[in-house]
Amino acid sequence: MRNRLIPLPLMLSATVMTSCARGPIQVAPAPTLPMPEESRVGPSPSKLLTPSEAYAEVAKLRADLERELPPRLLIRPKDPQEWIARARGQMEASGYSVERPQLLIVVDRNPRVQQMAVILAQPEGEWLVLGGSKVSTGQANRKGYYITPTGVFLHTDAILDYRAEGTFNENHIRGLGVKGMRVWDFGWQWAVKGWRSDGEGGEIRLLMHATDPDYLEQRLGRPASEGCIRIPAAMNKFLDRHGVLDADYERAAQDDPQYRAVLFAGRRMTPLAGRALVVIDTEAG
């Protein structure tokens, strides 16, 4: 039995609380967008790709990333090898082993960086950075705001994701972005309270999600969240459309309509789909 923390009836809305957006957030059904026939659901992520097949898939995804993200949002890390080395070090410290070619989401919470990258990890063969975008992680020195924790956080079918309804809070802010934006849920995690100087911590619900496109997306690239990871809407759609972190979800969706309801309708599921979010901090040395 899966330990589902958030029940989500098929095609029905539910109300959940998050630590990143104040107030209740309405859950929306997965969106359906028209896509070319050749771009529909791809090979199963359980298929083990050879290094050459993985490189070919990376080339396709890079082209998709460049097409789907506006140039102002697309970022290529200045030192991709440092990102790879940091990600590998964090994964080794966490005991996470790469048993097949797969994609990782790597986030640098360094206040002077505030970026994410999609990285190909392989047990054999070269690791590659596909590209990324600006993000916002936890803000220090503000009451109620936590510092996004470092580590490896797995996106598994033990927790059911949801989608934003696009409703406004009391400050007229859509905390999770417009209706239909995916919210990746990594469960309860320990984080330092950013408003304290003694290192005291507490639990937050670690999420990765879009943000208000009118007021907050333009401010990505600086710490601003209550502990979660805010990403641009275009990156949200890219990760969602290609199932970048949905290896476990795709398997669960084969026999569970709740998981099918969460997954993007009309997705091109990459065979490199993974399950790991890696948070690093290059300020830490």
Image (spheres, rainbow, N blue to C red):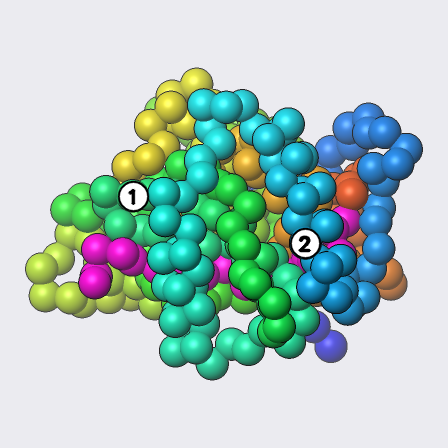
Instruction: Tell me the element at label 1.
Output: loop
Q: Which mark is residue 85?
A: none
On the image, the x and y values in percent for residue 232 come to 49, 33
Q: Is residue 1 left or right of residue 254?
A: left
Q: Please count the marks in the image.
A: 2
**What is the crowding at mark 2: few (fewer than 14 residues within 10 Å), some, or many (at least 20)?**
some
Amino acid at the residue labelled 2: Tyr
Label 2 vs 1, first from the N-terminus: 2
Residue 169 placement (x, y as % from top left): 43, 29
Disc 1 target residue = 113
Position of 82 with respect to 5 (left or right) is: left
Q: Which residue is mark 2?
A: 55
Looking at numbered disc 1 in the image, what kind of residue is underneath it? Answer: Val
Magenta region? 269-285
- The residue located at (33%, 55%) in the rendering is 148
Q: Name which residue lies at 78% across and 43% down.
A: 268
Callout 2: helix, strand or loop? helix
Q: The C terminus appears in which quarter of the rendering?
A: bottom left
Whether residue 34 appears in magenta in the rendering, the answer is no
